[in-house]
Image (cartoon, rainbow, N blue to C red):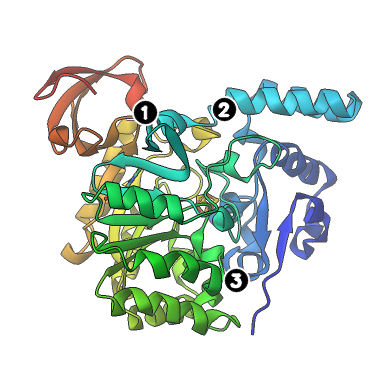
Amino acid sequence: MQKFKSYTLNKLEKIPQLSGLSEEQMEEIKIVSSIYPFKTNNYVLEKLIDWNNIPDDPIFRLNFPHKEMLQTEDFEQLKEVRANGTEQEIKQVIYDIRMKLNPHPAGQTDLNGAYLGEEKLEGIQHKYNDILLFFPSQSQTCHAYCTFCFRWPQFINDLDFKIQSKEIDPLLEYLERNPQISEVLFTGGDPMIMNSRVLDSYIEPLLKVDSITTIRIGTKALSYWPYKFTTDDDAEGMLNVLQKITDAGKHLGFMAHFNHPVELEPPVVKEAIDNLRKVGATIRTQSPLLRFINNSAETWTTMWERQVQLNCIPYYMFLPRDTGAQHYFAETLESAYELYTEAIRNCTGLASTAKGPVMSMTHGKVEILGVNDNVYTLRYVKHRDNSKTFKVFTAEPTTPKPMWIDDLVEVKSEITNY
Ligand SMILES: *Cc1c(COP(=O)(O)O)cnc(C)c1O
Ligand code: SF4
């Protein structure tokens, strides 16, 4: 049995594989990790990263922060204050840089609130009519942290950024008052960090809600700790809880997060997927498109084809959100579109099911349908005002290299505002 062993910033020196790095390289990781949360684990270190290929190895890039994730002036300022400043000064610089990184994009905290009367419910986001996001307090961490994570502020203790719920009762009451909601999506962090007993305390009461026909679980455990569903002490217990969902006649949808085909290779991943399918789960996959990690069409074709072989369904190709190190990870909208179409062209039909490239923004999820003569054709695959869902519109860039929806302005559409 594999024992889970995680490494955070204060255990960086203990990671055996890093012993070959220079002091300067280590210092770089420490500087950037003082802004973005850092965590990796023994499975990622031993089975996923190719240590002959660092720093360019995609999984190394996925877990280990690097200098370019900060703007040069921020990096230099931080380096300087860490060397010569007081504790208080260091804290202040860290805080200021974090605030510049748009920690809460797309009105998540303001616009997506769920209310019972005047009371705003903790740990629930209700953006789209029929589906609710639920953030259990026990799932506000992951088996490792992705450098590009758009939820990065959730993992930082001393900032009051957390979105989490300790209780199920307000959720149940909200569902009762909103019978149009048919799906609950467990998210975090990673809900599959929870043990089976805690998960069960949420699932059991939900199964009694007739209006809920689907339970989704957003997770990266199949990539960062597949033993969760195979050899962990709690694996059988976990599978039993999941089985209850399908036994109750509800759809169990795993939204699995894979960023690179390497994550699909270890045999334990197939075992984990097979075990989930045995309890009736359907596994759909999603990932953002990321420079330095997966920005080639071939990588996506390979990833999607392999997912189909493993009986997973490609679902979304996202663009990295406008928070954190987006400036470092994002492709331009045009190259993202080119890359997506090339990847799909080389896929079999069954592997070409992913919507994309998709931006999740304030009003909804926007898909790029085409780019011609600098005019972008776009569509909401989901809009918070459902009457606008699937409407097509066109937009033109306001900057030479648009990277996000904010860099476009609408020119002609079936709808008037986005
Ligand atoms: C993406 C998302 C969902 C789920 O969207 P699907 O397109 O149905 O997978 C639900 N709620 C929020 C807030 C989302 O961003
Ligand atoms: S697994 Fe998901 S929530 Fe966790 S760090 Fe990665 S992207 Fe963020």
Q: Where is residue 176 shown, x and y percent of the image?
A: 29, 52
Q: CA distance from mark 1 to mark 2?
A: 15 Å
Left or right: 350, with 65 as reference point: left
96 and 279: which is toward the camera: 279
For the question of whether residue 287 can be seen, the reply is: no
- Amino acid identity at mark 1: Trp
Binning the other alpha carbons within 10 Å of mark 2 as few (below 14), some (14 to 19) or many (20 upward) gives some
Q: Quadrant of the N terminus?
A: bottom right
Q: Earlier in the sequence, mark 1 or mark 2?
A: 2
Which-is-in-front pick, marks 1 and 2?
2
Residue with the mark numbered 3 = 47
> On residue 404, which mark appears?
1
Could you say whether the residue bearing mark 3 is in a helix, strand or loop? helix
Residue with the mark numbered 2 = 101
Q: Earlier in the sequence, mark 3 or mark 2?
A: 3
For the question of whether residue 309 can be seen, the reply is: yes
Quadrant in the picture for residue 227: bottom right
